[in-house]
Amino acid sequence: MKQHEIDVLLSDEDDHLKKLHKIVLESIDAEKILVQNLQKVEPDNSSFSQKISDKVAKFGGSWRFIIFFLSLMAVWIFFNVVALTKYRFDPYPFILMNLVLSCIAALQAPIIMMSQNRQEEKDRKRSENDYLVNLKAELQIRSLHQKMDLLLEEQIKSLYDSQMKQFVLLKEIIAKIDNK
């Protein structure tokens, strides 16, 4: 009888381990699917013109550009006001300077927009990756909850079984005491 009880306990423990292994294998399969779906951040395969537009956008949106351009305009205006008449290439009201500024603005705006569109695409891929990583973490947490629930269930079951055995032993002891 005692050997049978030991075999039953070992069998229960074996079933318990099989359930844990199944949960682990399911979580590994779910992780494989997520890892395969992660968007790879591709190396920079930008064309020469795209790299140029990125550099122009980076420089055009910096304080260096603003300071450089304000300095250039100040020199331009100063030279055309102070220089002798024959050396002035853009006298007041600085029509040539207005034309140059308009051309720079007309060219710089679409270049900056192209650069922003590429950056937006990179950001979108990064946010998809973040979502998949968060989903993976959520699946791992669920798997841990399942494991904990299973462990608690098995622990409660084994505690209940041991209490039942103790009650049987107590009944046997009481019966032996009453017989004496």
Image (cartoon, rainbow, N blue to C red):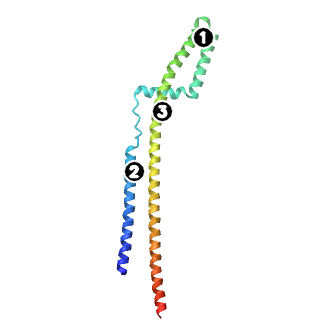
All told, the count of numbered labels is: 3
| Rendered image quadrant of residue 66 | top right
| Residue annotated with mark 1 | 94
- Vertical relation: 45 (above or below) 95: below
- Vertical relation: 81 (above or below) 146: above
Question: For the residues marked 2 and 3, what is the alpha-carbon distance in whole angstroms?
Answer: 28 Å
Residue at image x 48%, y 24%? 111
Residue 148: give its label: none
Q: Nearer the viewer, residue 44 or 161?
A: 161
**Badge 2 amino acid:** Glu
Place of residue 126 in the rendered image (x, y in percent of width and height, measured from the top left): 46, 39
Question: For the residues marked 3 and 1, what is the alpha-carbon distance in whole angstroms?
Answer: 38 Å
Place of residue 51 in the rendered image (x, y in percent of width and height, measured from the top left): 44, 28
Q: Nearer the viewer, mark 2 or mark 1?
A: 2
Q: Nearer the viewer, residue 141 or 39?
A: 141
Helix, strand or loop for disc 1: loop
Helix, strand or loop for disc 3: helix
Residue 31: give its label: 2
- Vertical relation: 67 (above or below) 13: above
**Badge 3 amino acid:** Glu
Quarter of the rendering occupied by the N terminus: bottom left
Question: For the residues marked 2 and 1, what is the alpha-carbon distance in whole angstroms?
Answer: 66 Å
| Residue annotated with mark 3 | 120
Place of residue 180 in the rendered image (x, y in percent of width and height, measured from the top left): 47, 94
90 left or right, relative to 136:
right
Ranked by sequence position, the earlier of labels 2 and 3 is 2
| Rendered image quadrant of residue 4 | bottom left
Place of residue 35 in the rendered image (x, y in percent of width and height, measured from the top left): 39, 47
